[in-house]
Amino acid sequence: GRHVTIMVGYMGDNTGLTKDAGWELGVRTTVPAEVDAVWEWLLGAGLPVWLGEIDALPTEKGESYETADGVRGTVRGRTEGFRVRVSWQPNDWPHDSTLQLSVKAAASGTTIGIHHEKLADREERRMMLGHWKNVAAAFDAHFAATASPTCSRWRPRSGVSTFRKRGCAPAVGSGSARDRQGRFPPTAQARLL
């Protein structure tokens, strides 16, 4: 008989490598809130969660921004209630990248999409994938904590916002930091802010 050898990973893992945008990634989460409320929060009080400490993101294409923690860039595009694209460069990066946040209505609320492209290499992609997954988890936690009292009507697909049919208590093993009354302990709240 013939012997066949399969070389797994011999050429390396090129997941996330594109011809035009270099290394890229995408993270999505669905939160239990209406699109307008999610958009308003993301571009208002939620800016520090995903962009950094900044009072407001400019609204016009070509306008520049800089966060208190040294991330800088320019607005590359903005479609109200749908998508914002910015160049994104932390102060310790020798290059910029492109970051896009989008919102879309879903059966269980709103899907928030994070797309990050023009990353330098596989390692930078791996590092940023972990970062944006944490940001998505913070989105989940924020909207789970602010969900309406009729939580059972919302059925988010991911994150810490999985609820039982009765009330808003998190399901056992959901990974939620909330207590039985649905409140976050003070230390968990501090980590989410």
Image (cartoon, rainbow, N blue to C red):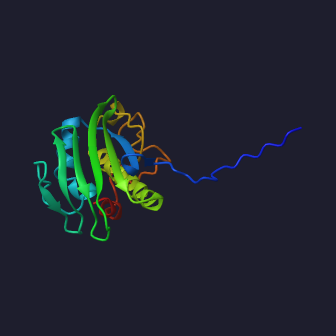
- The C terminus lies in which quarter of the figure? bottom left
Work out which residue is located at the far front of the displayed protein and give it: 19
Residue 121 on image: x %, y %: 44, 59
Q: Nearer the viewer, residue 124 or 130?
A: 124
- Where residue 185 sits, quadrant-wise, is bottom left
Residue 139 on image: x %, y %: 31, 49
Count of numbered circles in the view: 0
- Where is 92 relative to 61, above or below? below
- The N terminus lies in which quarter of the figure? top right
Q: Is residue 27 left or right of residue 51?
A: right
Q: Nearer the viewer, residue 114 or 89?
A: 89
Q: Is residue 12 left or right of residue 171?
A: right
The residue depicted at 42 percent of the width and 46 percent of the height is: 18
Residue 149 on image: x %, y %: 28, 38
Work out which residue is located at the far right of the displayed protein and give it: 1
Residue 85 on image: x %, y %: 23, 47
The residue depicted at 66 percent of the width and 49 percent of the height is: 8
Q: Nearer the viewer, residue 148 or 128?
A: 128
- Where residue 152 sits, quadrant-wise, is top left
Residue 191 seen by the camera: yes
Q: Is residue 127 left or right of residue 146?
A: right
Work out which residue is located at the far top of the displayed protein and give it: 107
Residue 182 seen by the camera: no
- Where residue 112 sits, quadrant-wise, is top left
